[in-house]
Amino acid sequence: MAGKMVANTIGEIQTKNGLHGHLVSLRAAAVYDIFGQTCLHELIKKWQCGEADPKSLTTELPEGNINLEQFMEQLTQYGKQAPVETKRNANRSTTRNLLKEGFRITQSFCQAHGQTRLMTAQSWYQFARIVVNSLSHDFHLQFRPHDLNQLPVAYEGHSIDASMNGHSLSMPLRILLAVYDEIVHFVEHELP
C-alpha cells in the first residue's frame, strides 16, 4: 500500500522514460507560455499604437469568451504598469512552478524507486533543494537547522549562505532554467 501511495503522488509516471518525457514537456510548455506572453505583450504595444486589431486574439475563460480589447480594458483599470507587471509576474510564476514541480516530481520518483541517494549526491541538489523550499513558501530563504549544516551552497556563481536567512531569494531566470536542465540531464543520463 505504501508503494501505491507514493506512486499516486507522481501521477502515472512509473518509468525513467516517463519521468524524462514529463520533464521535457514541462520545460517546453514553460518556454511556450513565456514566448506566448512576450508575443501578447508585443501585440498589446502594437494595439496601443493602432497597428493591430485587438479583436483578432480571443480566449475562453470560465466567465466566458474574452478578446484582447476586453482584456486590455481590465488591465488599464489597474494602472499603466499592469500590462508590464502582468507579463513579468506570469513569466516568473511559470518559471518558479517549472522548477518546483520538476524538482519535487523527480524527488518523488527517486523515493518511489529507491534512488534517493543518487539524486542527493548530485552537485546541484542542495542548491536546488534550498531554492525550491524558498519558492514553495514565501520566496524568502528560511533555513532549518538541517539546512544550515549544508550551507553555503553555490551554483554557477550564485551562492546561498546562512547570512541570507530571512531575506528574499533573488535568482536570474537563466539560473532557474539551468538548474531545471540539470534535473532533466540527471533523469536522462544518471538514473538507471
Image (spheres, rainbow, N blue to C red):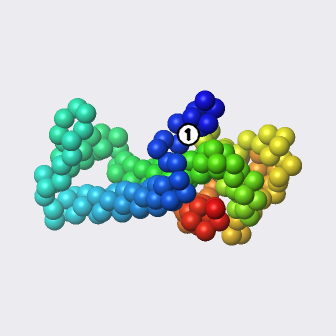
Amino acid beneath label 1: Ala
Q: Residue furthest top?
A: 1
Q: Seen in the image, is 57 located left or right of residue 76? A: left
User: In the figure, 30 relative to 101: above or below?
Assistant: below
Q: Residue at x 69, y 48 (%)?
A: 114
x and y percentages locating residue 115 in the rendered image: 69, 52
The answer to whether residue 73 shows anywhere in this view is: no
x and y percentages locating residue 160 in the rendered image: 75, 56
Q: Seen in the image, is 95 located left or right of residue 6? A: left
x and y percentages locating residue 41 in the rendered image: 31, 59
Pointer 1 local density, CA inside 10 Å: few below 14, some 14–19, many at least 20 = some
Frontmost residue, 10 versus 172: 10
Q: Quick one: quadrant of the C terminus? A: bottom right
Per the image, label 1 sits on a secondary structure element best described as helix
x and y percentages locating residue 84 in the rendered image: 38, 54
- Quarter occupied by residue 140: top right
- Quarter occupied by residue 122: bottom right
Q: Seen in the image, is 129 located left or right of residue 9? A: right
Q: Tell me the residue that label 1 is attached to.
A: 7
Q: Residue at x 39, y 57 (%)?
A: 29
Q: Seen in the image, is 28 located left or right of residue 142? A: left
Q: How many marks?
A: 1
Q: Quick one: quadrant of the N terminus? A: top right
